[in-house]
Image: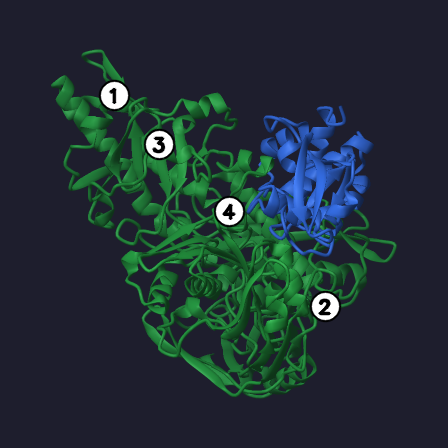
Amino acid sequence: MSLIKTTYGRRSFIKSIGLAGGGMMIGFSWLASCKETTTAEEVAMMPDEWFEINGFLKIGDNGMVTIMSPNPEIGQNVKTSMPMIVAEELDTDWNNVIVEQAPLNTDLYTRQLAGGSQSIRAGWESLRMAGATARHMLKEAAAQAWQVPLAEITTAAGIITHEASGKSAHYGEMASAAALIPVPEEVELKDKSEFSIIGTSRKNVDGIKIVTGQPLFGLDVQKEGMLIAMIVHPPAFGMTFKSMDAASVKSMAGIRDVFKMETYKADTPRSFSDTATFNEMVVIVGESTWQVMQAKKAIQIEWEQASDFSFDIDFFGNTQTTTYPAGLESTENHVLKMADLGSKKGNVVRKDGNFEAAFKKATKTIERSYSCPFLAHNTMEPMNFFANVTPEKAELIGPIQTPEFMEKSVASRLGMTLEQVDIQMTRMGGGFGRRLYGHFLIEAAVISQQMNAPVKLVYTREDDMTFGNYRPAYYVNYKAGLDDNNQLVAFQVRAGGIPESPLYANRFPAGAVENYQAEDWTLKSNVSVGAWRAPRSNFIAGAEQSFLDEVAELAEKDPIDFRLELFERAKNNPVGENNDYEADRYAGVLKLVREKSNWGNQQPGVSRGVAAYYCHNSYVAQVLDVVMKQGVPKIEKVYSAVDCGIVVNPDAAINMIEGGVIDGIGHAMYSAITFKEGVPQASNFDKYRLIRHNEAPSSQQVDFVKNDIDPTGLGEPPLPPVMGALANALYKATEKRYYHQPFISNKPFIG
Amino acid sequence: MATFNVTINGKSQTVDADPTTPLLWVLRDHLNLVGTKYGCGIAQCGACTVHLNGVAVRSCQLPISSIGANEVVTIEGLSEKGDHPVQQAWLEHDVYQCGYCQAGQIMSASALLRSNPNPTDEDIEATMSGNICRCGTYNRIKDAIKTAANSGASS
């Protein structure tokens, strides 16, 4: 056991927070039972009284436990895994746990954000402490009630026992007394070997609601008197509102109002989560979705070219200026400019040894360039938010990855205090980074304020896809040189993009090559961008791993052996400083995937590719098998080996990895958003290709490196390397290298 | 506006709506059956899949005026207690991630098993390729359909 101070997140343990009680089972409920099947009878067995032990949990008089899940749920399954961590240290029976989505409460919880694959990693200590603290208080309550020494009391699965006297009680019997026990200064955490919930597979707590179609998502919110609102945004990046003919639309059936809205005022303070290119839009409000959609089709609006537009954002304490230059941009032009800039010297970010001299002296050299297009996030649930803004308060309900940040900007925009704003988080129909940017929450609030009525803002798929904060377009040029012994002695990466570079100068193979140079460059654009699952890694990993495959081939070495040699170098005699990876763990996942995939012994007709990458504090290696069927590549199997420390919920983690693999394959293979005169050339799934069932790998296998390291990220790390494994397998299958994403475009499918 | 009598999940319902209103929005806005999801509005993603006389259809493309006496079943009516073999198989495999597309996936899968109780991998792929899952749960969807087939989902 380890003893930890309860000081971190101490505000979480302030009493009398006044969370809602058992009445929340009615109506649009956030409660989710952890039992694998829940019947109405079981739901009726709710306790008569709940006792709040701390901000993370309350215990019912019958022993049931409600655990708050503090972070937004975007499909990464934190609503199950975060409470599992609390339940572990509380030492309760998971079958008696109910999970409730916590409200936004910055006094109670830290980092209520879904992003950077950090929910579990950042929450690990405070979640454990919350459970352990409550367990301590329950034990102390029992010690006082039974007049026995605290040290002699044990717990197991929600039962408190004093062996010597033969006394025992379930948690519910001690809950009212425990709630009055002072919060201890320090508490004991379990030894990791004692874990009985963490490391075991537990079903998604919302499973039954998902399969029966119960309301869970922002788009499902229905309230008395609620109106439907939709926006009409400029048809092109670089355009803005000029004028409209609102009158003809206002008379249409069911339409209540049509007006122009300004989302952010010039003086609204913005954080990174307030990134949005379109600020002036037309709003149509009506009684039903279909009626508003008809008015949206009918309305006549004139747009004009916008001038330069810029705003300051607070990026975690640093002020940054986002600028959208005037003009109507096209992909054709972007591609030419990227190839031009990518061939020139950029800003040198890291320099070890002398790349140019070593490259000149090298026995064999190779140079290759890779690129990728902008990508839309395309969460299956389009952007939406419910808002009911009255002079007294703003009630906001919907899908948002950054509620804590949006609370500030929406309060300012509405002229309210933070206390007047209540943001409730719904389960999200996907996030992938798109809902880090909550302009739609502000839009809903402004519309509700204007209408003086509850409204649900709904984006159509077209609105959603053409008002993106897209994954940037990237371009990278690599050069490598080998010496007489086929050792990699020179390596250069020049990486840039629109409007940011994907370069991670200190990642592999930095540290493993004597003469290494990393350069970056950028090109400004008015196409707005944002974090898209595994930002920057989602391109640079695949490019780097494809390039290393070619370098290994040039060196006449097995691609895994070639990488392992480099990791040996990085481990034993690292080049330079600040190398952002542990060579041993990196090599570890490669060795594991080599073993599990039986590398080198694949079936006849199967073409294999391998790749490995480190991001979000986790290591992933993948082997991908392709067979050609009537000239079309079919992915037979993908093997993933993952080192993410302790795996909290193994089956759910495997699900996440399988999904990341499919997501990565799909976007590398099929997806793109392109522009002509500022107009996105895809606005729905007829033109924007997402991977479909028949294109997914036939099967997958996931293996974890077993260790006792505190858990690290998992939502993002499985995606980046698979793009490289795919490209490398396709090369073996087709004898052609794939440099530019999407690898296959405009392929028809039968739907 | 016009009045329509439709049968949804075995229950007769009266709806006042514009005749062109797609069934999807009648279900969601008029009948508060929000299990059927909006994803694209052009029959490309499958999130809005319901059964019309037992056959999977995209409710975003079906005007309310076209329903007539045909029986509509939505995810809410697939079973009384969430115990349809396909729902059970979904729970067993813990298929979902975000969960948003899964009602449509389940409706497509259950209609497939009704017409083809023992589908091959190719049958599953062909039918299920009309339903997009952005989270990438396709492997689990396939496994769950096979589990449901073995447990007799066609009955």
Name the spot of residue A430 as percent of width and height, x first: 55, 53
Image disc number at residue A222: 4
Upstream in sequence: badge 3 or badge 4: 3
Image disc number at residue A22: 3
Chain ID of residue with mark 3: A
Query: Callout 4 environment at 10 Å: few (<14), some (14 to 19), or many (20+)?
Result: some
Q: Amino acid at mark 1?
A: Glu
Chain ID of residue with mark 4: A
* 1 and 3 marks on the same chain: yes
Q: Secondary structure at mark 4?
A: loop
Mark 1 to mark 2 CA distance (whole Å): 65 Å
Per the image, the residue denoted by label 1 is A173
In the current view of this chain or complex, which residue is farthest to the right? A630
Q: Toward the viewer: A109 or A81? A: A109
- Residue A625, compared with residue A282, is above or below; it is above
Q: Amino acid at mark 2?
A: Tyr
Chain colored blue: B
Image disc number at residue A738: 2
Upstream in sequence: badge 1 or badge 3: 3
Q: Secondary structure at mark 2?
A: loop
Front: mark 1 or 4 = 4
